[in-house]
Amino acid sequence: MPARLHVSENVSLASMTTLGVGGDARYFARVTSEAQVRAAVAWADARNLPWTVLGGGSNVVVADEGIDGLVLQPDLRGWEVDDSSGRVRLRVGAGESWDSLVALAVERGWGGVECLSAIPGTVGAAPIQNIGAYGQEVCETIVEVRALDTVRDEPCTLPADACGFGYRTSRFRSGDMSRAVVVAVAFELRADARATVRYAELAQLLSRQSPPNLCEVREAVFALRRRKSMVAEPGDPYARSAGSFFVNPVVDDQEYAELVVRARSRGWIGAREEPPHHEAGEMKKLSAAWLIERAGFCRGFERGAVGLSPHHALAIINRGGATARDVIALARDVQAAVGEQCGVVLKAEPVFLGLSPEILASLTP
Ligand SMILES: Cc1cc2nc3c(=O)[nH]c(=O)nc-3n(C[C@H](O)[C@H](O)[C@H](O)COP(=O)(O)OP(=O)(O)OC[C@H]3O[C@@H](n4cnc5c(N)ncnc54)[C@H](O)[C@@H]3O)c2cc1C
């Protein structure tokens, strides 16, 4: 039998998010089992209330008005490890911390997630936007995702190739499973302790150690992330953010060629130089941070209670006492400037909870 569902009223959400803005949840329930997830959704449905999921709150902007419905927080715990066959199979509850998973993997010599060190949040949220950093994406190690499909009111287990993983997206973020609640994720890691180093900045830092071990890669990732205030540590005022506020735009050849012309004519780059980019199949992935700085919003930009991190132009920070309105106004201005100056559309990365459809539409071009 599942433990009884406990629903609290008027619970402040700002303190449950890394950005630290937003109002209260009208109702809030921490759920610790699949049965409780089901019970929470049924509780909201029976009262005709909307419901939404909050993990560790590191990729959300909560509306100042709060959320007039039920916020459920998956706190399903537990680890199952099977390393009997040369590969390591790991099944982890959605409520476990993502970085604890990485720490355990590195400690035991299991490769595959070491570059994803220090990403805040929960295991259950990792597949939602297919977290990635320093040349690794979580979809490379996910075997399957166990979720409650709330539309059909039944649990389902989706193999990785049915999850629609892409660059910072999945079926759970924008597809037909966006009303699913992830309860556990299964991973397959390498047992050979071999580290993956594909990212130039990381390779450079590790250049004296060849080949680096998993522990060295994890330490190097922490060091790089700390320099950019991309570790959600309470002592770092510039880490009061939702991480990168914009995803790196992916453009086709024509859009890229237009940017090259514009960048050269404005003197942002030399006549033979190109804007920073990575090849992404047939497309090109641009640096959103570079575009933002070219559009006139520099690192350390301040506007009242909000600003851009002095260590990373991609992070909108709460400088103290910010509201969701402040954050959204700055995000819109940055988007508009990049559109005007660079001719490129910037897409916001965080998920907006409790915002009106009009505001949402204006932020999701
Ligand atoms: C300092 C900092 C650095 C960051 N660096 C990175 C980075 O390098 N790479 C990267 O990809 N991200 C990064 N992020 C963003 C964030 O950490 C990740 O997106 C993380 O996976 C969010 O996890 P969370 O548990 O906090 O989810 P939340 O922020 O609580 O939720 C995010 C979304 O997932 C949904 N969700 C959460 N849990 C579940 C569940 N169990 N079932 C269904 N839906 C769910 C929520 O409804 C919401 O839509 C960073 C954030 C910060 C603050």
Image (cartoon, rainbow, N blue to C red):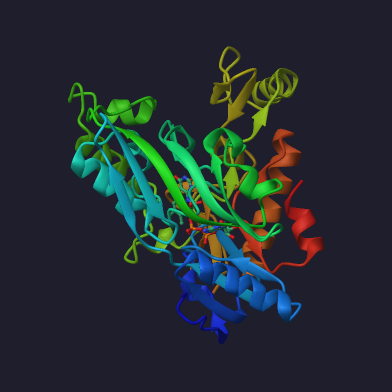
Image coords of residue 245 (percent x, y): 57, 51
| Residue 345 located left or right of residue 90 | right
Is residue 69 among the parts visible in the rendering? no
Residue located 32% across and 50% down the image: 80
Farthest-out residue, front: 1
207 displayed left or right of 49: left
State left or right for residue 217 relative to residue 247. Answer: left
Q: Nearer the viewer, residue 215 or 126?
A: 126
Residue in view at x 57 percent, y 41 percent: 168
Question: Can you name the residue that lies furthest to the top here?
Answer: 272
Q: Position of residue 295 (x, y in %)?
A: 65, 41
Q: Quadrant of residue 220?
A: top left
Task: Please provide percent x and percent y for residue 74.
Answer: 49, 66
Q: Is residue 283 above or below residue 50?
A: above
Residue 188, above or below 150: above
Check the image and name the residue furthest to the bottom: 9
Relative to the observer, which residue lies in front, 261 or 335?
Answer: 335
Name above or below for residue 343 compared with residue 118. Answer: above
Q: Is residue 93 visible?
A: yes
- Number of numbered tags placed on the structure image: 0
* Residue 36: image location, x then y, percent: 52, 71
